Amino acid sequence: MPPSARASQTGVVQRIQHFTVRRVIDHQQNDLVAEVFQAPQSWTDRSDVRWNPQFASNPVNVVLAVENPANQEGLFVYPAADFIAIPGVSRQGQARTGQTWANPMPPAQALWAYVQQARGSLPQFRVVSSRDASDLPVLRQMDASQHPHGVAMRVAYELQGKPMEEDFYAAYHLANVCSNVPGSGRACETDWGLYAPHSFRAPAGTLDRSLAVFTAIQSSFRQNPAWAQRAGAVRAQLMAQVSRSIDARSNQLREAKARSAQILAHSNAS
């Protein structure tokens, strides 16, 4: 659907259903408003701004659910999934930046793994379809060096005995990063994962008809510039700390090598 047609449809939906303004509050930042959006008046919403200063690469995530209590349809926003891999090196757990060590997967497989974790335990869970999603708004904000790729997947399952369908979307990214590490030579890593994972859910057979409402909610999101600036500053500070830690470790390695060379030279001289 062209952007102009989508905007027109969104306006019609908002006029038919009375939308009200909702706020996402960051309680860890003195109750600063992180985002605002609109949703049908009868729908409920809950949100959580999650900070983790140990995750320098992505220290904050907004988790959100906007639901229609009448039939359990809803829009959901999930935390990003960030991974890191080093060619030829096998590691497990989390890196010092907060990313998880894992070898890259193709976009559809990565989203499948994410959806499996989110909904795979529900009764009658199955994948209905999978496709590329080149029209995701977040793709326009991503750098070409990240090789952005939109991906979507529809799944079906039972929720409280009722058949449901849910469309999951995410922007896949993958970037190879190389740098010269003092005393160690050139080091490369692969950063990859899923940005902006979100989903739309509705009773089986009604999801396509509900997409106009979901699109209207999604297009109404506006981030508070003051909050975005603060989040960016925190991330920059954390990444600087990681960089200083890496530099300190490199200096320690150089000093250890120098001491070993001195000991060897002294031993040879004796």
Image: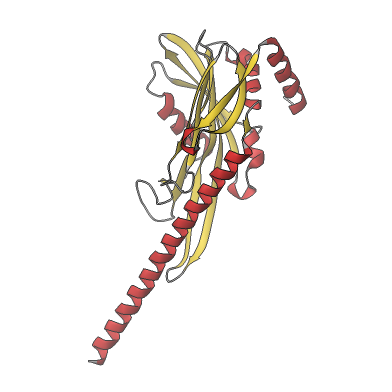
Q: Is residue 16 above or below residue 103?
A: above
User: At 41% across and 16% down in the image, what residue appears?
Assistant: 124
Decide if residue 146 is on the left or right side of residue 184: right
Decide if residue 117 is on the left or right side of residue 61: left
Q: Is residue 35 above or below residue 254?
A: above
Q: Quadrant of the C terminus?
A: bottom left
Identify the image quadrant of residue 260.
bottom left
Q: Is residue 9 above or below residue 187?
A: above
Q: Is residue 166 above or below residue 58?
A: above
Q: Tell me, yes or no, if residue 214 can be seen here.
A: no
User: At 38% across and 55% down in the image, what residue appears?
Assistant: 89
Decide if residue 240 is on the left or right side of residue 132: left
Residue 182, percent across and down?
Answer: 46, 70
In the rendered image, the residue lying farthest to the front is: 30
Question: Toward the viewer: 187 or 21?
Answer: 21
Residue 159, percent across and down?
Answer: 43, 13
Residue 249, percent across and down?
Answer: 38, 65
Residue 219, percent across and down?
Answer: 66, 26
User: At 51% across and 26% down in the image, what residue appears?
Assistant: 64
Q: Quadrant of the N terminus?
A: top right
In the rendered image, the residue lying farthest to the bottom is: 269
